[in-house]
Image (cartoon, helix red, strand yellow):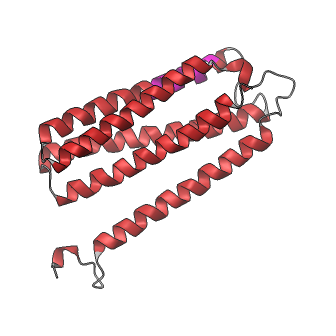
Amino acid sequence: MNTKTLGHDGHNSDSTDIFGFWMYIMTDCVLFATLFAAFAVLHNNTYGGPGIKQLVSLPYVFGETMFLLISNLTYGLGLLSVHKRNQKQLLGWLYVSIIFGVGFLTMELNEFIGIVREGHSWQSSAALSSFFTLVGTHGLHVFLGLVWMVVLSFQVTKLKINSTMVRRLTYLGLFWNFLDIVWIFVFTIVYLMGAI
């Protein structure tokens, strides 16, 4: 057995990494489930102010959604480049994914700033508190995913495509897919159902 993959007590460190990563994803599922439950309970508690329907533009949020989905597509194309061992192509797709991810975050921040400028902060009502918390938590995850992507871009440049980099890129790909799935629920539950 290859000693490089063994931990201190003889267990395979790859299986420990995989277990740890999936434990993290499961705890994030619980976190987002809790935030969705809070939003479901509080979304009508507007304290006499406007609801989400009156404060957000569905076409604008659809644009945000497209940015995030396209960044996921381009990241997937980057992973295909990994299997071809094409470093230049991988880095190109990573940069495109970063650009679309930053576009998504910029639009989300612009949306938040617009709502606050109209005088409706997270303190205005329970509905807005749950909205800002849920959508903001997702945005924070996207930001951290983008930082991770930038770090991996530098690592790929220095370390080239090796088995460690393939594993790291795969983990980030799973995380990025998870964020897209969560956003689909946000878009459906918060924005589409909120517009009805």
What segment is highlighted magenta in the picture? 104-114
- Magenta stretch encompasses residue 109: yes
| Depth order, front residue of 54/139 | 54
- Residue displayed at 13% across by 42% down: 87
> Which residue is at the far top?
118
Residue ID at (73%, 46%) = 38
Left or right position of 53 against 71: right
Of residue 177 and residue 126, the one placed in the foreground of this image is 177
Rendering coords of residue 96 (x, y %): 28, 29
Q: Quadrant of the N terminus?
A: bottom left
Residue 118 drawn at (x, y percent): 69, 14
| In the foreground, 40 or 184 | 184
What residue do we see at 44% from left, 63% from top? Answer: 22
Residue 160 is left or right of residue 120, and the answer is left
The C terminus: image quadrant: top right
Q: Position of residue 166 (x, y in %)?
A: 22, 54
Residue 74 picture quarter: top left
Question: Magenta region, mostly helix, strand or loop?
Answer: helix
